[in-house]
Amino acid sequence: MVGPGSPAPTAPGRRCHHPRLRPCALPADPALVRPTAPVRAEPPPRSFGAALIEGHALRKSFGDTQVLRGVDLAVRQGEVVALLGPSGSGKSTLLRTINHLEGLDDGSVLVSGTAIGYDERGGELRERRIAQQRVAAGVGMVFQQFNLFHHLTVRENVAGPLRWVQGMSREAARARADELLEQVGLADRADALPRHLSGGQQQRVGIARALAPRPRVLLLDEPTSALDPELVGEVLAVIRDLARDEGLTMIIATHQLDFARDVADTVVFMAGGVVVEQGPPEQVITAPHHEATRRFVGATTVEEHA
C-alpha cells in the first residue's frame, strides 16, 4: 500500500524505523462454538507476503514543479495496486522512480531490498549496471508508448534484451520469447515488425518483453492510454490474466475504474503529488471519503460509460 503512514525502508545513509506489531485477536476455541445452523465456508482471502517495495518520503521536481511531495510506499509480495488520479498527479513519475528511470531529489526506495541505481556506498551506477540491477531485483516495466525496437522483429524485441542484459544464449532466449508470445496471443506474429502490428498488439509485445526475465514486480504505466478504444480490451484481458494467475506483484497506473475494481487489491488515489486516499476498491472507487476522489471517480465513470 502507499500512504503517509507506511514504514521507512533502510537505504544507504538512512535509519530504519520499524513499525510496532499490532496485537492479534485469537480465534474462538472451536469446541466452544455451537452454531445453530450449518455455516457455509467462505473462500479464503488472498494472502500477501512481506513488503517487496518500500519507499519513504519520495520527492521529485522538474524545474519549479513539484511532482512527488513526500510519498511513502509499501507494496506486499503478491499484491496488485492500482494508482488512480488525474493527469499530472505523479502516478507515472512514482513508477519511474521505483526502478530508477527517474532519480529522486529526496527520499529512498527499495525493491527486494535493493536501492536500484546505487551501489552499497550510495554512489550512482552506470546505466548498464542499473539494467542488470533491475533484473536482479526482479523489476519489469510496461510503458505507455510501447517503447519497442522498430527495426527488430516481434520475437527479437523479447529475446534481444535477454541476451544483451542477462547473457542468455540465443536458443534459450528464442524459446523464452516464443513461450511468452504464445501466452499473449501473438505466436503467429513473431516474425513481424512492430509497424505491421496494431497498437494493442504492440502493447502485448511490450508486456511479453517485461515478463521475459521472470520479474517478481511488474510496473505498468497507463498501459492502455495510447490505444484506440476498441483495442483497450485485448490488453486489459492479458493484464487481468497476469493478475489472477501469475502471482506477480503489480503496480498499475490507470484511468480504467472498472478494470481497477476488478483486479486490484488496493487502490491508491493521487493528486498534486501526494496520496489523497487509499484502500480496497470497494471503498475508494465505490464509496470514496475525500471530495477530490469523489470528483475524479464521478467524472471518470461518466467518461467510461458514455
Image: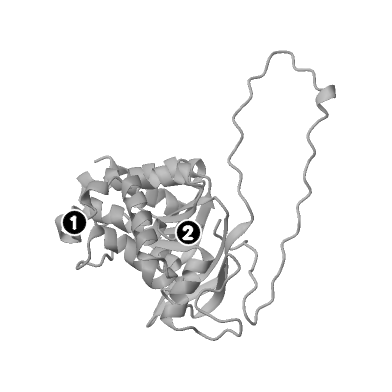
Q: Is residue 128 above or below residue 208?
A: below
Residue hosting label 2: 215
| Amino acid of disc 2 | Pro
Question: Is 16 situated left or right of 73 in this image?
Answer: right
Image point (44%, 84%), residue name: 126
Determine crowd level at label 1: few under 14, some 14-19, many 20+ residues with C-alpha closer than 10 A: some
Nearer the viewer's eye, disc 1 or disc 2?
1
Determine crowd level at label 2: few under 14, some 14-19, many 20+ residues with C-alpha closer than 10 A: some
Image point (32%, 60%), residue name: 158
Residue hosting label 1: 192
| Amino acid of disc 1 | Ala
The quarter of the picture where residue 46 lies is top right
The type of colouring in the image is one colour
Q: Identify the residue at the far top of this view.
A: 37
**Residue 52: image x %, image y %?**
58, 60
**Residue 42: image x %, image y %?**
61, 27
Query: Which of the labelled discs sits on residue 140, or is there none?
Result: none
The quarter of the picture where residue 211 lies is bottom left
Secondary structure under badge 1? loop
Of residues 295 and 147, the one nearer the viewer is 147
Is tag 1's residue or tag 2's residue first in the polypeptide sequence?
1
Cα distance in 3D space between marks 1 and 2: 26 Å
> Is residue 142 at least partly visible in the picture?
no
